[in-house]
Image (cartoon, rainbow, N blue to C red):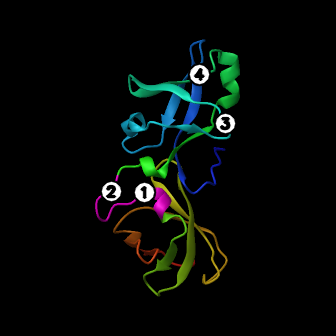
Amino acid sequence: MKVNKLDTNLVCVGSIGKSRGLVGEFFLNSFCDPQDNILNYTTVLIEGHEDLQLAYIKKFNNKFLSKIRSIDNIDLLKGYTNLKLFINKSELPSLEKNDFYWHDLIGMRVIDCNNNDELGEVAEISNYGSNDLLEISPSGSSVDSKKRQIPFVKKIFIIEIDPENKKILVDWPKDF
C-alpha cells in the first residue's frame, strides 16, 4: 500500500525525529493523546515508503525511540527525518459519547452562534504552542471568502460540536 497522507483511511500519529546513536535509531515524535498511545499500534506506516517497517517503538525516559528495520546507519536515516507516521483508522480505540478524534472534525461546517452565519469548513487542526486551532476555509455557502483560525477552547469559542449534522457552533465574530 502506498502511504499517502491524503488517504482517508489513514491518520497521522507521529513523525520521525532526529537520530540517536550510529545504528539508525531515532526519536519518534508522538502526536497521540496521551503520547504513550503510540506504543499500542501494531502497524505504523511511513509516509511515502510502503516497503519500510518499524522494528520497534519503545519508551526512553520521557521520549520514544524507534528504528526502521532495514536502516542500520545514521547517514541513511537522515533522509527520513520529519516524515509522518500513519496508522489505519481501524486501529484507533472506540470513543465514548461526545468524544471525537481531530480527523472527525475535518470538513465540518462552522457556524457563528450569534447570527447563524456559516464561516466555512474545518480544513485542518494545528497547534502553534498555546492551544489547538481550527483552520477554517471558506465554503460555497460562507458569508465571505476569508480564511480563519479559531482557538479550540470549549465553552468559550467552541460552543457545540454536532457530528451527526457535521457542524460546529462557534462564538466567533465574522469580521475577526
Residues packed near mark 3 inside 10 Å, few (<14), some (14 to 19) or many (20 plus): some
Residues packed near mark 4 inside 10 Å, few (<14), some (14 to 19) or many (20 plus): many
Distance, label 3 to label 1, CA atoms, is: 25 Å
The residue located at (66%, 36%) in the rendering is 49
Placement of 37 over or under 71, stated as above or below: below
Q: Is residue 68 left or right of residue 115?
A: right
Ranked by sequence position, the earlier of labels 4 and 1 is 4
Callout 1, which amino acid? Answer: Tyr
**Count of numbered badges drawn on the protein:** 4
- In the picture as drawn, the residue positioned furthest to the top comes out as 22
According to the picture, the residue beneath numbered tag 4 turns out to be 19
Q: Is residue 98 magenta?
A: yes
According to the picture, the residue beneath numbered tag 3 turns out to be 49
According to the picture, the residue beneath numbered tag 2 turns out to be 95
Distance, label 3 to label 2, CA atoms, is: 30 Å
Placement of 39 over or under 78, stated as above or below: below
Distance, label 1 to label 2, CA atoms, is: 8 Å
Callout 3, which amino acid? Answer: His
Stretch of the chain drawn in magenta: 94-104
Q: Nearer the viewer, residue 45 or 38?
A: 45
Q: Nearer the viewer, residue 81 or 5?
A: 5
Question: Residue 78, how many percent across, how many down?
Answer: 68, 24
In the rendered structure, find residue 144 and report the number of the disc placed on it: none
Callout 2, which amino acid? Answer: Leu
According to the picture, the residue beneath numbered tag 1 turns out to be 101
Q: Is residue 145 left or right of residue 93?
A: right
Placement of 163 over or under 49, stated as above or below: below
Distance, label 4 to label 2, CA atoms, is: 34 Å
